[in-house]
Image (spheres, rainbow, N blue to C red):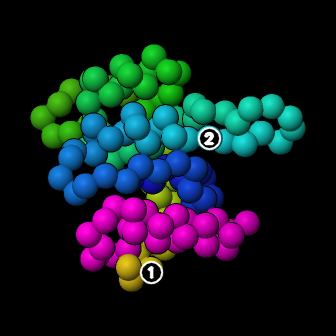
Amino acid sequence: MVVVDGKGIPLGHHLDRANPAEITLAPKVIADVKVGRRGPGRPRTRPQRLIADKAYDSDKLRAELRARGIDLIAPNRAGRGKTQDGRKLRRYRHRWIVERTFAWLHNFRRLRTRDENLLVMYAGFFHLALMLIALRRL
């Protein structure tokens, strides 16, 4: 999982095996986010908002993020009442930036399908790809 900013530059990530649900990994990824400041000081660890897809629509995750001061913007799952108004969901149209970053990651063939048996080897190539993406964007 990768968290990116508004330009598609990766801010945080978490690697795990393929079978856990993404909603259980979301707090781990958000805990890894560090946004640098323009002046002196520690990097920020809380983004203002998190734009995610329908899989992240959960009361537990919303409560967790609200306690940290993060606004979750995700469309409602089918058969569920409205949990947010349409004004917030207008920001969801910017999700293509995240999908574009995943497409950039898939340009690296070793990351498209995980052939490595060890997570350490895959993590090395993953970090190298993230560095190259960040350097291209800056």
Secondary structure found at label 1: loop
Image coords of residue 9 (percent x, y): 60, 59
Q: Residue furthest top?
A: 67
Using a 10 Å C-alpha cutoff, classify the residue at mark 1 as few (fewer than 14 neighbours), some (14 to 19) or many (20 or more).
Answer: few
Using a 10 Å C-alpha cutoff, classify the residue at mark 2 as few (fewer than 14 neighbours), some (14 to 19) or many (20 or more).
Answer: some
Position of the C terminus by quadrant: bottom right
- In this orientation, does residue 100 appear? no
Type of amino acid under label 2: Lys
Secondary structure found at label 2: loop
Q: Is residue 79 above or below residue 137?
A: above
Identify the residue position indicated by label 2 in the image: 34
Instruction: Please tell me whether the stretch drawn in magenta is mainly helix, strand or loop.
Output: helix
Please state the extent of the stretch shown in magenta in the rendering. Answer: 111-138
Identify the residue position indicated by label 1 in the image: 107
Upstream in sequence: badge 1 or badge 2: 2
Q: Nearer the viewer, residue 124 or 109?
A: 124
Residue 129: in magenta span: yes
- In this orientation, does residue 6 appear? yes
